[in-house]
Image (cartoon, helix red, strand yellow):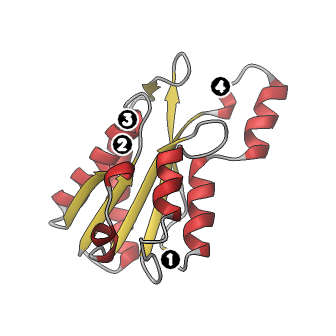
Amino acid sequence: MNILILYDTVFGNTKKIAEAVADGFSAAKAKVRLIHAGEAVPTDVATADLVVVGSPTRAFRPTAATMKAVKNPLFDFTGKKFAAFDTRIDPEEIKSGFFRKIVTSFGYAADAIEKTLLKRGAVKIAEAHPFIVTGDQGTVLRKRETETAFDWARTLLANAGSR
């Protein structure tokens, strides 16, 4: 199975998650390519059996580079199996009830990625996966998130119909 992981990152956390997912695929002997969303070309998508897309959540959305990639008319996602993930602040850690309500009401990066890829004809194989960041402006991954990402890759392989 050929797997493409497209990601963007702001503080480096989403890249760390993408790398951990790639390691999980590699450990299962899957062929995986890890590419920054802004550097992908049409053949990257065309040759992939499974596309995993990840972005940090910024102002309730994916980064511009991520959205540009998933909306790129040169990338044919029709029939492609996909899964999405994001990095986000845990709403339970937000002290202000008002701000917590805004965050949970307006959504996260993975939601927009999923919606866009479904409109483009891609086939979702798993629910979007959140990976939690903490610290000032969400600059630190929560403990064990990379291990969770590694394990998530195995789930994605099973859902995609590969070992």
x, y percent for residue 109: 58, 48
Amino acid type of the residue that numbered disc 1 sits on in the rendered structure: Ala
At mark 4, the secondary structure is helix
Amino acid type of the residue that numbered disc 4 sits on in the rendered structure: Glu
Q: Residue furthest front?
A: 74
Q: Which residue is under mark 3? A: 144
Q: Which mark is residue 93?
A: 4
**Quadrant, the C terminus:** bottom left
Mark 4 and mark 1 lie on one chain; the one further toward the N terminus is 4
| Mark 3 surroundings within 10 Å by alpha-carbon count, few (fewer than 14), some (14 through 19), many (20 or more) | few
User: Measuring 41% from the left and 38% from the top, which residue is drawn there?
Assistant: 9
At mark 1, the secondary structure is loop
Q: Residue furthest top?
A: 136
Q: CA distance from mark 3 to mark 1?
A: 30 Å
Foreground of the two, 161 or 1: 1
Q: CA distance from mark 1 to mark 2?
A: 22 Å
Mark 2 and mark 3 lie on one chain; the one further toward the N terminus is 2
Q: Nearer the viewer, mark 3 or mark 1?
A: 1
Q: Which residue is under mark 1? A: 122
Mark 4 and mark 3 lie on one chain; the one further toward the N terminus is 4
Q: Which residue is under mark 2? A: 17
At mark 2, the secondary structure is helix
For the residues labelled 3 and 1, say whether their Cβ atoms are less than 8 Å apart. no
Q: Residue furthest right?
A: 98
